[in-house]
Image: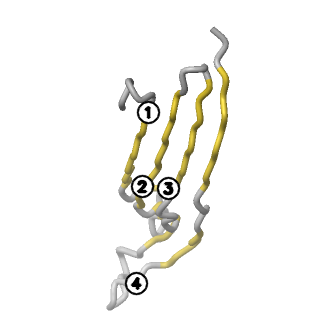
Amino acid sequence: MNQEAGIDAVLALNTIGDRLRIVGREGTPDIYDRGRSQLDFTFIKNFPNNFSVKVTAQNILNNRYIIASTNDRFPTSDGEEYIYSDFRTGATFGLSLAYTIR
């Protein structure tokens, strides 16, 4: 952040590990949301005349969302997992102009 120049910028990397989604019962495997990372960027430029410009980019890496399970009771020889869902949400970009009334 550079207050003299009116600039504020943030680059954030969020990483989550595997999360249990559904507990398996009666011989069925547990189902997990597999871990992923998300990279976001925000840039704001404030001008002396109360205007500001904001540029955002969310989910820049566009990593896969995977919902999968492994059968711990009967593992396959190669450790293969069953994938229930595998998708990408896409990156989102934004540009906004604001005026502050003081």
99 left or right, relative to 30 = right
State the residue position of label 4.
80
Residue 7's mark?
1
Cβ–Cβ below 8 Å for labels 3 and 4?
Answer: no
Is 47 above or below relative to 21? above
Lateral position of residue 33 relative to residue 96, left or right:
left
**Residue type for callout 3:** Arg
Residue located 41% across and 40% down the image: 10
Q: Which sits in the foreground, 98 or 94?
A: 98
The three-letter amino acid code for the residue at tag 1 is Ile
Tell me the SS state at disc 2: strand
Mark 3 surroundings within 10 Å by alpha-carbon count, few (fewer than 14), some (14 through 19), many (20 or more): some
Instruction: Check whether the beta carbons of the residues at disc 1 and disc 2 lie within 8 A of each other.
Output: no
Q: CA distance from mark 1 to mark 2?
A: 37 Å
Q: Residues within 10 Å of mark 4 (few under 14, many from 20)?
A: few
Q: Three-letter amino acid code at disc 2?
A: Arg
In the rendered structure, which disc, 3 or 4, sits on the residue that comes first in sequence?
3
Q: CA distance from mark 1 to mark 4?
A: 48 Å
Q: Secondary structure at mark 4?
A: loop
- Coloration mode: secondary structure
Give the residue number, with chain letter if any, for mark 2: 19
Q: As shown in the figure, which amino acid type bears the numbered disc 4?
A: Glu
| Residue at which label 3 appears | 21
**CA distance for labels 3 and 1:** 41 Å
Q: CA distance from mark 3 to mark 4?
A: 19 Å
What quarter of the picture does the C terminus occupy? top right
